[in-house]
Amino acid sequence: MKKMTKLERVLATFEHQETDRVPLYDLMLNDDCIEYFTGVYPPYGEEGARLQAQAVDRMLDMARGVGVSPHQPPTDFTDDPTLLEWARYGSLTYRYNPIRTYESAIDWVKNQIQSLSKWRENVNLQKASEDTRMFFEKLYSWMSEDHVVCCLRQSGVGLDDIRGTIGIEFFSYLDADDPGLISEYLELYTEREVAIIHAIADPKISPFALTYGDIAMKAKLLHSPQWLRREFFPRLKRLNDAYHEHGIKCLFHSDGYLMEIMPDLIETGIDGINPIEIVAGMDVGEVYRLYHDKIFLTGGIDMSQLLSNGTPDQVREVCKKTISEAPTGYFMGSTTELDNSSRLENILAMIEVSWGYYPPGAKPDIMEQIRRRKEEIIKKYQESFKSKQA
């Protein structure tokens, strides 16, 4: 079969058609990968975003979170240099969270509802459209002609935002005491998101978007099926429907074990599922067997244990097995993201299985360069900690 472009490969995989090789999809936030494929350790700011985008372009066929730059973590929250490196792309609630009491959680939700109720006054939809177009023009200018297919937008119904801000404990209390308050927040959030989708959606920019909501954990759901059917699935369907009006596929993302409500998710109109979290009990072969005629699959290569602690040979074995279990409509990739906990040699082994050959680095001595850089960073942090303690 003749070599396909990345876009051709992605579109064919959406439809479970034959491809020249298994495509790769991921969220890549790994400094070693960026340095391996570009030759440069990414700095903060736009130059770091450009290098991250170029590394993604050289690694993957389809991706989200492209054009992301690292940021300076608070150096006093740990004396572990490895954790500090991970935190370059992490999101930390450090030392102070303003939501300390149930009353403050209620106040936050009410204030958000008041703000969201004025979204028509506060959101410039034309500017959102122009900003999206300009962002992707810059992003694609950093890449090759046969560039990676980038996610148009990540759209949720507000569940992750409210639950993540006030915490699941206060969220649960509020849902029992005043469920209408949560429902009102989710409704306004979804209403605004649907309007933004219609303003920015353009399949010429990207043929897919991510719709999301972390609704599960290991072996079970975070919310009851009844609650999800009342508050989450109908709103998720509105997001999917909005994208579909513009000919854009919807890849749904949720960590955790989703098999109990997979039929519900499919009824909302999702086109694909991500990340098929193995350690949570998900299984690529089972999802393919039950639903391959309805959705495409992405992920399935464990990042919490295999890519972070396994060996390249173990990664190759798992990748080959997974491909055999999902022979069409499958984007190989990690179970959520390739962050700084994932070992470079394991990521390269996964890419090797897809490409059929070992991915070359930016320089002949790039592995030695990365090794020296990591040693220097550890030394720098250790000296910094010693000077603070002196």
Image (cartoon, rainbow, N blue to C red):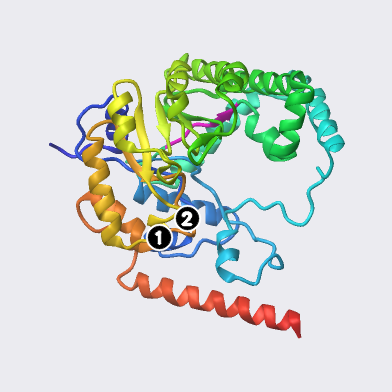
**Is residue 91 something one can see in this rendering?**
yes
Q: Residue at (80%, 26%) from the top-left corner?
A: 115
Q: Residue at (43%, 35%) from the top-left corner?
A: 274
- Residues marked 1 and 2 touching at CB (< 8 Å): yes
User: In this figure, which residue is indicated by the disc labeled 1?
Assistant: 38
User: Relative to 32, is 274 above or below?
Assistant: above
264 on left or right of 159: left
169 on left or right of 376: right
Of the residues shown, which amino acid type is indicated by label 2? Answer: Leu
Where disc 1 sits, the SS reads helix
In percent of width and height, residue 40 lies at 45, 64
Of the residues shown, which amino acid type is indicated by label 1? Answer: Thr
Q: Quadrant of residue 361?
A: bottom left
Q: CA distance from mark 1 to mark 2?
A: 7 Å
Q: Is residue 152 magenta?
A: yes
169 on left or right of 66: right
Residue nearer the viewer, 308 or 65: 308
Label 1 vs 2, first from the N-terminus: 1
**Is residue 10 something one can see in this rendering?**
no
Q: Residue at (36%, 71%) from the top-left corner?
A: 367
289 on left or right of 28: left
Instruction: Looking at this view, name the residue that lies furthest to the left.
Output: 1
- What residue range appears in magenta? 150-156
In percent of width and height, residue 320 lies at 23, 47
User: Relative to 267, is 298 above or below?
Assistant: below
Q: Quadrant of residue 130?
A: top right
In percent of width and height, residue 180 lies at 75, 18
Q: Mark on residue 183?
A: none
Q: Mark on residue 51?
A: 2
